[in-house]
Image: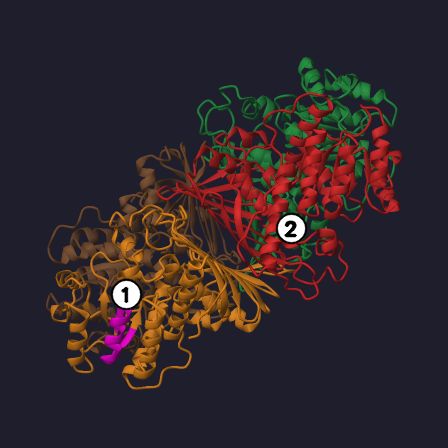
Chain colours: A brown, B green, C red, D orange
Amino acid sequence: MGMVGGGRDAFIGAVHRMAAWLDGKIDLVAGAFSSNPEKSKLSGSDLSIDPKRVYASYQAMVEEEAKLPAGERIDFVSIVTPNHVHFPVAKAFLEGGFNVVCDKPMTFNLEEALVLRDLVKKTAKVFALTHNYTGYPMVKEAREMVRRGDLGKILKVVAEYPQGWLLNPIDAEGQKQASWRTNPEQAGASSCIGDIGTHAENLGRYITGLEIEELCADFTTFIEGRRLEDDGNLLLHYQGGARGVLYASQISAGEENDVNIRVYGTKASLEWHQEYPDNLTVKYPDAPRRMFRRGNAYVSDTAKRFTRLPFGHPEAFIEAFANIYGEAARGIEAEVSGQALPKELDFPTVDDGVKGMAFIAAAVQSAKNGGVWTKMPKT
Amino acid sequence: MGMVGGGRDAFIGAVHRMAAWLDGKIDLVAGAFSSNPEKSKLSGSDLSIDPKRVYASYQAMVEEEAKLPAGERIDFVSIVTPNHVHFPVAKAFLEGGFNVVCDKPMTFNLEEALVLRDLVKKTAKVFALTHNYTGYPMVKEAREMVRRGDLGKILKVVAEYPQGWLLNPIDAEGQKQASWRTNPEQAGASSCIGDIGTHAENLGRYITGLEIEELCADFTTFIEGRRLEDDGNLLLHYQGGARGVLYASQISAGEENDVNIRVYGTKASLEWHQEYPDNLTVKYPDAPRRMFRRGNAYVSDTAKRFTRLPFGHPEAFIEAFANIYGEAARGIEAEVSGQALPKELDFPTVDDGVKGMAFIAAAVQSAKNGGVWTKMPKT
Amino acid sequence: MGMVGGGRDAFIGAVHRMAAWLDGKIDLVAGAFSSNPEKSKLSGSDLSIDPKRVYASYQAMVEEEAKLPAGERIDFVSIVTPNHVHFPVAKAFLEGGFNVVCDKPMTFNLEEALVLRDLVKKTAKVFALTHNYTGYPMVKEAREMVRRGDLGKILKVVAEYPQGWLLNPIDAEGQKQASWRTNPEQAGASSCIGDIGTHAENLGRYITGLEIEELCADFTTFIEGRRLEDDGNLLLHYQGGARGVLYASQISAGEENDVNIRVYGTKASLEWHQEYPDNLTVKYPDAPRRMFRRGNAYVSDTAKRFTRLPFGHPEAFIEAFANIYGEAARGIEAEVSGQALPKELDFPTVDDGVKGMAFIAAAVQSAKNGGVWTKMPKT
Amino acid sequence: MGMVGGGRDAFIGAVHRMAAWLDGKIDLVAGAFSSNPEKSKLSGSDLSIDPKRVYASYQAMVEEEAKLPAGERIDFVSIVTPNHVHFPVAKAFLEGGFNVVCDKPMTFNLEEALVLRDLVKKTAKVFALTHNYTGYPMVKEAREMVRRGDLGKILKVVAEYPQGWLLNPIDAEGQKQASWRTNPEQAGASSCIGDIGTHAENLGRYITGLEIEELCADFTTFIEGRRLEDDGNLLLHYQGGARGVLYASQISAGEENDVNIRVYGTKASLEWHQEYPDNLTVKYPDAPRRMFRRGNAYVSDTAKRFTRLPFGHPEAFIEAFANIYGEAARGIEAEVSGQALPKELDFPTVDDGVKGMAFIAAAVQSAKNGGVWTKMPKT
């Protein structure tokens, strides 16, 4: 694979690389690691990439890689830049004939997302979006439970993503991650909901299959001078009558990354926390609570397919991320060799990205209008 | 004490009695245990009450008890009836010269609450409302932390009270507790928020001291034929800018009574769950999480004052309830003996009841209007 | 009831009183609260006991109470003194015709225990020993599980009782509780194993029904100058081949009172912690873990019989203690009224006390001999 | 690197490979993956290894790899065979001039371990033993705490490694992992203590630095026909007076791999569980419990050095394993390039392996002699 972004002081690029490397099937062989050509070169050197394939810009990368013979050029690009660059890079590589793995949120705004969707359909390339939390085996188990009807009809979803890292104005003090994530020119119309609320939304949709019909959003910017919201609380109405509570926060002191979800059905409810990802708790009205644990013989074949270690030897974030990469790679391998894609591929697609951007757009609109109930835009 | 309500198949009456008995300072000596005189008599017999003081009605009880000499008549009445009877009973006993301990929600509606408040002021009797969760030592510790400024300025409060006991239409099937709690003639304008959401509201206010300015409420009745909501999700704006998420549910499969709260400040956050009431977790942006445990030397004098056992020997619901009774009894003892009330009495008062009823009223109004933001009524 | 011990600065006396009062069926009407007559008098006054029935010594108490008419005198005595006084007081009251509730360990040594057992049989009085942890509903549920065969054949038991309160030489500094509990003249031949290890042993025997065949004990006194061990670690061989690990400690920094037990069978294992007493976790080789919670419809009738509150409203230490009192009271009520004892009485008896003293004796002997495997004495 | 063992139906080989690949710095380029040459070939093909470097035996591998030019031949071998083959393979590669990473227990018996130690010293090659639990950042944090004196003087260590996977006679039924691990010809003199008890021992020594002086071991074989113990419980005396309880079990129903440790000192105690490896709990006699979490700014530089992800994004087993590989690789890189080894290398060495084998030998001897206290052999 090749990589765009992910240079020396980036965060998520390193995660993508470990996810790609873990199973020994994906090599990193090319990159445009920074918009600063010098930094790109140094980063490439850190990673022992052949200097000829360390590019000064993503445009140069598309152009040069496309010139390489089929067996030598990259099979796909991994896009790990700030949000506003996702779309142009994805567009360039898709049009250049490459498959794409892209970090979330998919694009800068909904309009770009719709264009990108058309482009993916037109080029028939593989496009995978790294909503990585859906890569956890016990999240997949949760989805299986809902699909099998173990929970009955879903009545209510509570999804939370509390963080505390922006409790102080580190963006104003120049911390790089904080700066671009709170900058509307780079992050888009939302910070907190765009960066992490969208993970909670995606997680809920992945597990339950429910689509939001309308929502009511309350955004707050607690830190003076910050340009985007750092806390967002939402009430949701799902199609079909289920209800939802969803919140994300960047100013919740001492919270780390405990994205979590509870799903309540007519027969049972489930609960999952990413900080303890091997556990999936199910509660019943009239039977003891059950804790399902990754790696056991009793979990679904789906959960098993995404498991590397025996029970009790914990798997975690990188392994889940690698599951997204592994599925994308299965698709890309087929695409590159001109075969039909495997049927049961399980990774977030451009359609998930469109829905995520629509969710952000609706939330921003509701919040701007003082918290009125707002329909999800047609996509 | 005497009791109104709490007969044979009641639930909360038995709890009030254990709370009263626990410390060996309060005796139950009279009662009108049911609106059915025969049932009242049988219940009185179960409780070994002198049959002369088992009354056929609360009216008879006020009248007869008032005739007894000062040292013999009850010092206070405990009201444990369904909601719609709270007000007339409280009124009768206050006017009859008795102190009152009353279950929550305080009255049937806000109007009654305001009248009751005036009456309490006028009669200068002790009136204690059993928002029992505030009786837990670690809830008191949480309040002390906020008061001392350990959390800094409060930014956000998340309070939840999920239950699952009304997931099936047991009210329609005649289960007594379920029937009256979902009947607008007995419960008032709200079931879920009135019965348990108000506990969450009270808990948040007790710990943080914050008052709600406006709210947005989404009520749902999931069970067909049920007349009041069985799920309520709210967004809150507190005076001074803090934000809140509050929900209560009676249809959350497998949930028992885990009322819980998280309070986020500029310096730290705290978390408390009533199902594990001896623990109070505090999270910091830059230091290890701390778990404060009841009974340790390091907790505040306030928390210590409400503790009976050494650390590690758990205390729970009845002990917390008894703490409300204990404080009410301290006040009543002073009142009965004509002394000034102790200054630092710590139990929910008629003012808390008014605020609780105002909260219910605002939530009902918001929900009826489709989830519009609604100001708290002036009280 | 009457009480011997439990005066002003005692700890366990207050617990016994709350346990007795909780259900409104037992009154405290007499006592010899201290070996110091003046202190006994003051303690009686604190408790609003009729001064005539506050005695200067337990001997006086037996004598005077026995003179009272049947309906007026105490039905039983509760013995809450330091260990070395248990036997003479119990003997005096049994011989005086009274039923007895006694704190543990039952006696000063095994010899006294055997004598006491004979006396109980001879007098045919009720004798209840407050191994209070067996009063927890979920401990009873655990026993039911084992009895029903849910766990299969029991292979291994791990029981722990770690405390940290004697980590500093507070006994040498005169702290009353610490002083007598580490004084061989008052506590007996063991401190740590006698005071709390015996609870762990009793808990294991109650749940599993297994009897220890032989044991190997390693005692350590970590605090210089202390006269009895403050840490004891044991390996156990049960009759029938099961194995055990049991330890108790008073010098485990930061531990409170988390007596806990794990029982491993051929079909499943269970785990219970007294600091979270409403939970009982069961693990299976091939099925999700289950957490049984007190108060649910699915628990056994036995567990239900000892439950006061609905699920999710936690019960704890005092309620469990009150379950011992409640069962003892059922027996005593029958005895006093000349009826046969109910069949399914569920409280620790003089036989449990004998086994506990035998366990202490064997452990002390093993430890003294350098940790050699030692058979349990014949009793 | 090259690998010996780890063919198609092996377990630990795959773990070693992921650990090696994770950070993108180690490639697998050669192997003798099975004692069955055909299986070795197929396994090599699965792994896309150049067929020329897939060998029919480890002997062939040493010979052929040694012939390759310095820059082309493997830098080290990873030994992931059953225990009885560790020694001959390690010997062959060390003597052939290669560095070694070896799974545990290090050798078949203590005698081999002593020979191997001499050989490592003589050849001056890097030898790393994969006691992988010491690779967890919070285990390293625990060691730092002890070293800094945060816990005071260590009094007691409780280490457990319960598993349940051998509760049924799957070894007799031919399950490959179970068969060799319970076969004294392949596993050595102990199964349970050798396979997992030694991890608990190593973990305790790593964190506390304490050396065992003598021990008392109780071994049981619960499954009929099994040739080695499947449950082992030990009491420990450490040099300097600390006490220990250590047990391992393979027949504990429903237990997965929760190796865990509690260390009690005069100032504080700590607790760590591998199933929740990002948490490290510290308890104090007189202050709230603290939970240290991986990835926070407040942890030691040592813990930080072994961390890949921000707080709240969990790391787990593979990352810890990769930390051992990463440190070994740092040493090997220096060795291969003829430089001095970095000073602060942090991986288990041949000395740890010798101590582990001595521990196993002493435990086996004690158990064979009926649980007598047995001194650790001089090594």
Q: Are discs 1 and 2 both within one chain?
A: no
Residue type (three-letter) at the residue carrying disc 1: His
Q: Residue D88 in magenta?
A: yes
Nearer to us in this view, C38 or A178: C38
Please give the chain letter of the residue carrying mark 1.
D
Residue type (three-letter) at the residue carrying disc 2: Gly
x and y percentages locating residue A116 in the rendered image: 24, 54
Nearer to us in this view, B347 or A85: B347
User: Does the CB distance between marks 1 and 2 fall below 8 Å?
Assistant: no
Please give the chain letter of the residue carrying mark 2.
C
Mark 1 Cα shell of 10 Å, populated few (<14), some (14-19), many (≥20) = many
x and y percentages locating residue C70 in the rendered image: 81, 24
- Could you tell me which residue is drawn at 69 percent across and 26 percent down? B87
Residue at image mark 2? C194
> Which quadrant of the figure contains the N terminus of chain D?
bottom left
Q: Which mark is residue A30?
A: none
Secondary structure under badge 1? helix
Nearer to us in this view, D276 or A328: D276
Q: Which residues are magenta?
A: D77-100
Which quadrant of the structure image shows residue B105? top right
x and y percentages locating residue C7 in the rendered image: 80, 45
Q: Residue A278 in magenta?
A: no
- Could you tell me which residue is drawn at 70 percent across and 45 percent down? B308
Residue D308 vs C143, above or below: the answer is below
Residue at image mark 1? D84
Residue C14 vs B172, above or below: the answer is below
The answer for how far apart the CA atoms under marks 1 and 2 are is: 47 Å
